Amino acid sequence: MEDMAPELLQTIRLAWQKALISDAELRSLTKRITEGKATYKEVEDIAYRVGKDLSKALVGNITSDIMPDGHVPQNVAEKILQPTLREAHAMVIEAATKTQEAMNKAAGIGLKAQAAEFDAEKAQGLVYKLTNGLLEDTGWILDAPVTEFVQSSADRTMKKNVDFQARAGLHPIITREAEGKCCKWCSNLEGSYEYGDEPKDIYRRHRRCRCVVDYRPGNGKRQNVWSKEWHEDAQPEAIEARKRRIEELGRSKKRRRKKNCFQEEFVLKQVRWILKNTERQLSYGIRSRN
């Protein structure tokens, strides 16, 4: 039987890319990232919209009528979910690292922005769940779980930077803000916490959770919430000591480029090219119709 995955993947990518390009809110969020005015709230919003647009493209094109016996073969699921989830992860990581770099610069922190790795094991878990039964029973995996997978790239990147800065001698303050009429579980997690005192579930999300997790460096500086300017809080001696610890950490850290780093760089370049090419095609199509 002919492999249906390549053509189906192309269809899904095109639908996803059209949704991304026409998403006005996503363009607004991306502009704030580019201008260096974003926080992790904007990063999480980007992750949500990228994931939501992807899930809609998947749900709209992976249907029972085109699947053999109404069941998604594992090889088809892998060839569609693994690359699209990796591409979504790369988009979120680009937004997150740019935001982190801007935050570090504004706070006078000489540390490199950290990026969470693609969670291939969790992605494969979605593949297994999708293929474990008829699509009419497992299709829900393509909806909220896909969106939440993409959101986790933002959450895990923030956590990685918080942990990294804490090891460098800084004192990050982590804040979780409940969204709208949240559940009791989320309400219990809401608040601001010094690093080490935060609840163990502060980064976790339940199904369709839209709570915002953010942080500030807590490096002896405070930020004016209106002007976004940073001001010294700690004594000069303490600040200098922390700077020395940061420098020591930077010297001692070995820079190793793992295989998956090369893969994510490749995927990111591919995503940029695809989006640019698709936008050109869409513009050409609009001109042709006119």
Image (cartoon, grey):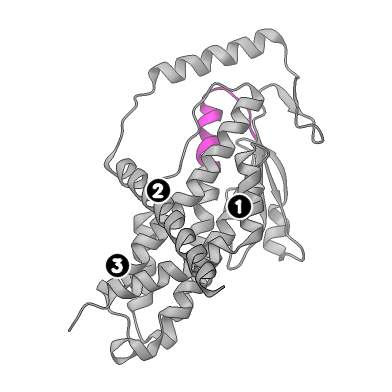
Density class for disc 2 (Cα within 10 Å; few <14, some 14-19, many ≥20) is many
State the predominant SS element of the stretch in magenta. Answer: helix
Determine crowd level at label 3: few under 14, some 14-19, many 20+ residues with C-alpha closer than 10 A: some
Marks counted in the figure total 3
In the displayed image of the protein, which residue is found farthest to the right? 226
Report if residue 45 lies within the magenta region. no
Instruction: Tell me if mark 1 has few (under 14), some (14-19) or many (20+) residues whose alpha carbon lies within 10 angstroms of its own.
Output: many
* Nearer to us in this view, 278 or 217: 278
Residue 36, disc? none
Label 3 sits on what residue type? Answer: Lys
Task: Kindly identify the residue that appears in the image at 63 percent across and 32 percent down.
Answer: 172
Instruction: Magenta stretch: give its range.
Output: 158-173
Q: Mark 2 points at which residue?
A: 268
Residue farthest to the top, as pictured: 237
Residue 147 visible: no
The disc, 2 or 1, on the residue closer to the chain's N-terminal end is: 1
Instruction: Judge by depth and name the residue closer to the eye, 234 or 224.
Output: 224
Give the vertical position of 141 relative to 98 (above or below): below
For the question of whether residue 93 can be seen, the reply is: yes
User: In the rendering, at what x and y percent does residue 132 appear?
Assistant: 34, 79
Q: Distance between the residues labelled 2 and 1?
A: 18 Å
- Looking at the image, residue 64 lies above or below residue 76: below
Nearer to us in this view, 170 or 19:
19
Residue placed under numbered mark 1 in the picture: 44
Label 2 vs 3, first from the N-terminus: 3
Counting from the top left corner in percent of width and height, residue 223 is at 75, 29
Residue on which disc 3 sits: 79
